[in-house]
């Protein structure tokens, strides 16, 4: 090679190397297919997840079944129950309160205790004062009747029939005879366990009987006649609990 040409090429190569060394470095470009755009899904995946709370299911209360309706006996059934009590009642002890009024105005009030012994045909009615002290007693064997004062002394002897006829509410003393009482009257059901009795013959009056819904035993007896009303309410009733023989005082052997 011509020495002059060799020197010229050497100078050109030197200039090219100098230019390469002095040029600024360019950033390395990645292929277009390696660069993926940022999507919302990618942001969600990178966001910190909150702690998920367990779902607590509340216990459901059982659906209450409707209660069956209580059996309501027919009026005829109630009357038959009353007759059954009249037949099977051997002993009775009950407190009573009796109020008599005329045209709605109270004219007398009394309270006390009634005792009944069916087999001995004995009935005793103790009338008590305001402080439950003894006022008088009436004891009968349904034939004769004896009235005793507060000390137990006899103050009157009379027949049961005469004394009963003078009582404003005879049904109060007719335990053991209710079947015959019902047969002498027309019986009408006013409402459940409440009956109106009117006599088939004779005088005019209305006797109202309120009977217990549990066993159809009388709880109230009310007699209405010509503006007069006498109502006896029975409470603390004990049925068929044997009574002491001293209750009747040995008056009737």
Image (cartoon, rainbow, N blue to C red):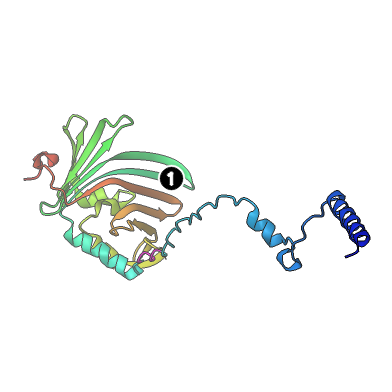
Closest to the observer, 240 or 57:
57
x and y percent of residue 147 in the render? 20, 39
Closest to the observer, 83 or 141:
83
Q: Is residue 97 visible?
A: yes
Whether residue 112 sits left or right of residue 47 in the image: it is left
Query: Residue at the spot x=42%, y=40% of the render?
Result: 107
x and y percent of residue 141 in the render? 14, 49
- Callout 1: helix, strand or loop? strand
Q: Is residue 200 visible?
A: no
In the displayed orientation, state which residue is furthest to the left: 253
Picture quarter with the C terminus: top left
Determine which residue is flagged by label 1: 101
Whether residue 106 sits left or right of residue 220 in the image: it is right
Query: Residue at the spot x=17%, y=52% of the render?
Result: 240
Closest to the observer, 102 or 6:
6
x and y percent of residue 234 in the render? 31, 47
Query: Residue at the spot x=30%, y=44% of the render?
Result: 96
Whether residue 147 sits left or right of residue 187 in the image: it is left
Relative vertical location of residue 125 with respect to residue 2 in this rendering, above or below: above
Question: Magenta segment: does it hold 69?
Answer: yes
x and y percent of residue 124 in the render? 19, 44
Picture quarter with the N terminus: bottom right
Which stretch appears magenta? 67-71
User: Overall secondary structure of the magenta stretch?
Assistant: loop
Residue 223, quarter of the rendered image? bottom left
Question: Magenta segment: does it hold 168?
Answer: no
Relative vertical location of residue 34 with respect to residue 222 in this rendering, above or below: below
Q: Residues within 10 Å of mark 1 (few under 14, many from 20)?
A: some
Whether residue 40 sits left or right of residue 88 in the image: it is right
């Amino acid at each position: 090679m011509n020495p002059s040409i060799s020197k010229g090429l050497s100078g050109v190569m030197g200039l090219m190397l100098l230019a390469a060394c002095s040029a600024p470095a360019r950033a390395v470009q990645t292929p277009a297919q390696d660069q993926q755009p940022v999507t919302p899904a990618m942001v969600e995946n990178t966001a910190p997840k909150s702690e998920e709370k367990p779902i607590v299911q509340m216990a459901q209360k059982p659906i209450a079944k409707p209660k069956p309706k209580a059996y309501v006996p027919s009026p005829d059934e109630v009357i038959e129950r009353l007759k059954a009590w009249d037949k099977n009642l051997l002993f009775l002890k009950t407190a009573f309160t009796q109020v008599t009024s005329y045209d709605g105005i109270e004219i007398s009030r009394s309270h006390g205790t009634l005792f009944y012994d069916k087999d001995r045909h004995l009935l005793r009615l103790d009338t008590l004062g305001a402080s439950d002290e003894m006022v008088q007693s009436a004891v009968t064997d349904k034939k004769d009747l004896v009235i005793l004062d507060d000390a137990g002394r006899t103050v009157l002897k009379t027949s049961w029939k005469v004394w009963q006829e003078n009582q404003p509410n005879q049904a109060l003393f007719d335990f053991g005879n209710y079947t015959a009482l019902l047969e002498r009257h027309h019986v009408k059901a006013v409402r459940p366990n409440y009956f109106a009795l009117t006599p088939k013959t004779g005088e005019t009056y209305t006797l109202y009987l309120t009977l217990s819904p549990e066993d159809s035993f009388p709880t109230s007896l009310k007699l209405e006649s010509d503006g007069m009303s006498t109502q006896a309410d029975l409470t603390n009733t004990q049925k068929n609990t044997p009574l002491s023989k001293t209750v009747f005082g040995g008056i009737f052997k």
